[in-house]
Image (tube, helix red, strand yellow):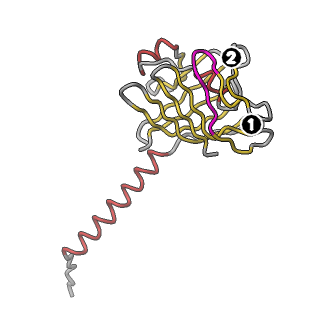
Amino acid sequence: MYRPLIITEWSMKAFFSGLICLLTLGLFVACSSIQQINVIEEEMTLRGKLSISFADQRLVMRYRFVGSPGKGTLYSRSLGGLVQNRLKIDQDQLFIYDSKSKQMIGYTSRMMERDFGVSLPLEAMTFWISGKPHPTQAYRAIIADNQDSLVTFEQSGWTISYESFMAGKDQNIPKRIKAMSGEIEVILTVDS
């Protein structure tokens, strides 16, 4: 005997609703994944939010930095996870991941100025994120705490302020860093 299968309007809606939820979840998982890497013991791994404010606009992104001061890799993605970038800092050289060639290519401060309208001192910032000024560049201490740790200093035309700290393995690591130069303000928070 032939039994017809009856698909009601409700069951079709439930099926498509479930399918849309599953596809949306898959999209968010795919967009938020950043290539995992092996971490060496001496390296620090920091995650958090990076905000760059100009006179008329503000960029906000999530980041992960793996490396040591002066040398490391900065992974960034937009808050929605749709735009991902990878920068490699090696002493005074900067490299950016090129999705077309699937390689790291040289990236100069002039190229950064062209792409973003500003050139950020990323190499120095890898030292600033660890709570100290770049060792080969002159700096001026403005405020130091009672343990002689810098709280605010000037270096390379930027004023760097540490607004809060968290305990690390060997030292206190800045939890919130503000760097200002003219109309540019960079705020970096460290979640872990």
Q: Earlier in the sequence, mark 2 or mark 1?
A: 1
Q: Secondary structure at mark 2?
A: strand
Which three-letter amino acid code belongs to the residue tagged 2? Tyr
How dense is the environment of label 1, judged by Cα within 10 Å: few (below 14), some, or many (20 and up)?
few
Taking the spot 42% from the left edge, 50% from the top edge, the residue there is 28
Name the quadrant of the C terminus: top right
Of discs 2 and 1, which sits in the foreground? Answer: 2
What's the distance in space between the residues labelled 2 and 1, CA to CA?
A: 30 Å
**Residue at image mark 1:** 40
Q: Residues within 10 Å of mark 2 (few under 14, many from 20)?
A: some
Q: Residue 73, labelled with which disc? A: none
The residue lying toward the viewer, choosing from 22 and 146, is 146
Query: Which residue is denoted by mark 2 in the rendering?
Result: 139
Residue under the point 41% across and 56% down: 25
In magenta segment, residue 161: yes
Magenta segment: 154-163
Most foreground residue, 137 or 150: 150
Taking the image as shown, residue 167 lies to the left or right of residue 119, namely right
Classify 25 as above or below 179: below
Tell me: residue 55, above or below residue 78: above
Q: Position of residue 86 (x, y in %)?
A: 53, 30
Q: Quadrant of the N terminus?
A: bottom left
Q: Residue 122: which quarter of the image?
A: top right
Left or right of residue 110, residue 159 in this image: right
Q: Is residue 58 magenta?
A: no
Pointer 2 with pointer 1, Cβ within 8 A = no
Majority secondary structure in the magenta region: strand
